[in-house]
Amino acid sequence: MSKYRTAIIACGTIARVHARGWRGVAGQPTEIGAIADTNPDARREFGDFFNVGEAHRYADYREMLDKEHPDFVDVCSWHQQHAEMVIAAAARRPKVILCQKPMAVDLGEADAMLTACARNGVKLMIAFQRPHHATWLKARDLIREGVIGQVTQIQMDDGGNILNTNSHNIRLALFLMDEPQVEWVMGAVERTTDQVERGLPAEDACMGLVACANGATILIQGNLVRGLGQGCRVIGTEGIMELDTTRHPDSEIPTDLPMYMPEGPSARYNYEIGTVKYLNASSNGWKQVEAPWHDSWSHQCQEAIDWAEERVEQPISSAERARAVQEIMMALFESARKRQRIYLPLKTRVNPLKLMVENGDLPVEWPGRYELRAKLVRGEAMSWNQTPT
Ligand SMILES: NC(=O)c1ccc[n+]([C@@H]2O[C@H](COP(=O)([O-])OP(=O)(O)OC[C@H]3O[C@@H](n4cnc5c(N)ncnc54)[C@H](O)[C@@H]3O)[C@@H](O)[C@H]2O)c1
């Protein structure tokens, strides 16, 4: 019998990845003890697949929290529900809450989540899993050792829209530089079509420069150039390092066929591989960095357990570190809104991109709202704005 019980709120794609993560921790100290989802098919498919008994499946996540008293709560719902769910979970005082990225949709929500956890003595982690890749942990150590000298710039090619996929890259940049303070952010945003991502306005393209107190800058080129997608290029005074992702072949990846799966097996996320190579005066060309592979999600769950058992003081994925990502993203949008450099700390608590869209500051040239993740929505709905059927 496992020592701990985890309760999962929202049983969609990423919840499956988390479930595999918890189960993949050595010795399986946690079991998936309870699940909650408003959609009955999601509850049934997920519950049957991961052997969660029917008595522990709930439509109302608050009822689940009240009845089950889980040790860990894992929030796997959409961006706009993260704050509400984390605050509700914190009030029930589990040991640790793990919440999906992005932490929140604005800075005000992120701070409310931290306040709710602090006043209840609950530890909060945000699931930016990629720094937990074995090779990326090693990359951070190599940078610390000075293999490429002093970091002067971290460049992100592409990486998708800021709030969703590029948030991973911003987190990566801060991680690789050992969490530097950020002094200012300057950003530009293009939004000529009315696209939303999980119901929230998203930009077509975004460019940003983030100035860190250690003298380095982070260059963000979201949806502007092709190159490293999830990953980055680290320019140092004595070399260059590139981080990228690949994954195990599909033939090696477990399927979740009985479940609704519009995007292929969710375990692709569990089987992702971080790649790293660097170039310096003594490397004799690009040198590939190797490390024994592990599931980054299991590594993150292990860290949650270690934090609960007070074996780590500041986990890689602590919410304070995710708040730093949230502040940069919002400062970038605020810079575009105010047409000026934004010095941190950021005082704006709402989402400036949303504000610009609502105020008509980013007029749509080609009308017609569309949802980037429409494929994920069940039934007849085409967005999370509509009630899924
Ligand atoms: N870290 C990563 O690499 C990564 C990858 C994919 C998704 N995500 C994040 O995971 C989150 C969820 O995305 P997804 O793709 O799994 O979504 P999804 O649409 O597959 O699943 C969401 C689930 O939430 C359920 N839900 C909605 N309202 C609910 C409520 N009030 N109570 C309980 N359940 C409710 C839905 O019924 C659905 O089953 C997003 O915030 C996304 O950013 C992260």
Image (cartoon, rainbow, N blue to C red):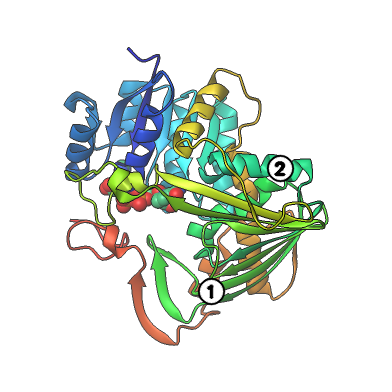
Kind of residue indicated by mark 1: Ala
**82 in relation to 372, above or below:** above
Find the distance from the CA under tag 1 to the CA under tag 2: 32 Å
Could one spot residue 103 in this view of the protein?
no
Q: Nearer the viewer, mark 1 or mark 2?
A: 2
SS type, badge 2: helix
Image coordinates for residue 53, horizontal then vertical, percent: 20, 25
Image coordinates for residue 31, horizontal then vertical, percent: 34, 23
Picture residue at 68% right of the left edge, 47% below the top = 176
Image coordinates for residue 332, horizontal then vertical, percent: 64, 65
Q: Is residue 310 toward the left or the right of residue 97 in the image? A: right
Q: Which residue is mark 1?
A: 205
Q: Nearer the viewer, residue 1 or 140?
A: 140
Kind of residue indicated by mark 2: Leu
SS type, badge 1: strand
Q: Quadrant of the C terminus?
A: bottom left
Image coordinates for residue 359, horizontal then vertical, percent: 52, 76
Name which of mark 1 and mark 2 comes first in the sequence.
2
Q: Is residue 15 toward the left or the right of residue 222 in the image? A: left
Picture residue at 38% right of the left edge, 84% below the top = 367
Q: Which residue is mark 2?
A: 142
Quarter of image, res 145 = top right
